Amino acid sequence: ALQWFTCVRPGAFSLSVNARAQGIWTEHNATFQELLRRVQVDQALLLGEVAERAMQQATFDAALMILSTSHVTSSNYFIIAGADGRGAIVTRYGNSSSADVWPLGGEGEQPPWMRVQTNVDHWVSADTGAYATQRRQRVVDSLV
């Protein structure tokens, strides 16, 4: 389960995991010992464990709940697409404080029918010049 990056539950949903390289509440200053402590003491889950729990769910909604509420060890994005046309990008923070769920049809700089995720948070504007924002914007511009 620790090597899953893209998974499909036929007739229900698909799930991909994407690295979250920068942004608020990342673990880039955490030592290896701190990450181990999170797993051992805090019982935080590794990304593959969260994906495995989500993939055991029968519905999009149940999987989304697992992805957005599980206690995680590190920062990442979960990209989930439902067979019924729903979808969301779930941004998880390395400190397990919360999650940002950005659904299809929601507000933002992208059309409501699509979400393009790179290794930068969706709320960081391309105007900032931050890492991967221009790449993300080029993809959005080519699709609309």
Image (spheres, rainbow, N blue to C red):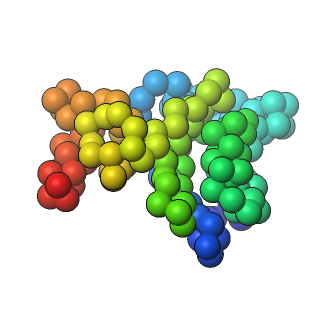
Whole-percent x and y of residue 46?
70, 48
Whole-percent x and y of residue 132?
27, 43
Report the side of 55 relative to 91 (left or right): right
For residue 13, above or below residue 40: below
Measuring 49% from the left and 48% from the top, which residue is drawn there? 88
Report the side of 144 relative to 106 (left or right): left
Q: Quadrant of the N terminus?
A: bottom right
Outermost residue on the bottom side: it is 10
Measuring 27% from the left and 46% from the top, which residue is drawn there? 111
Measuring 35% from the left and 34% from the top, which residue is drawn there? 107
Whole-percent x and y of residue 72?
68, 38
Q: Give residue 130's quadrant in the image.
A: top left
Report the side of 116 relative to 128 (left or right): right
Q: Which residue is nearer to you in this view: 107 or 20?
A: 107
Whole-percent x and y of residue 18?
48, 52
Q: Which residue is nearer to you in this view: 60 or 32?
A: 60
Q: Which residue is nearer to you in this view: 71 or 74?
A: 71
For residue 78, above or below residue 21: below
Q: Quadrant of the C terminus?
A: bottom left
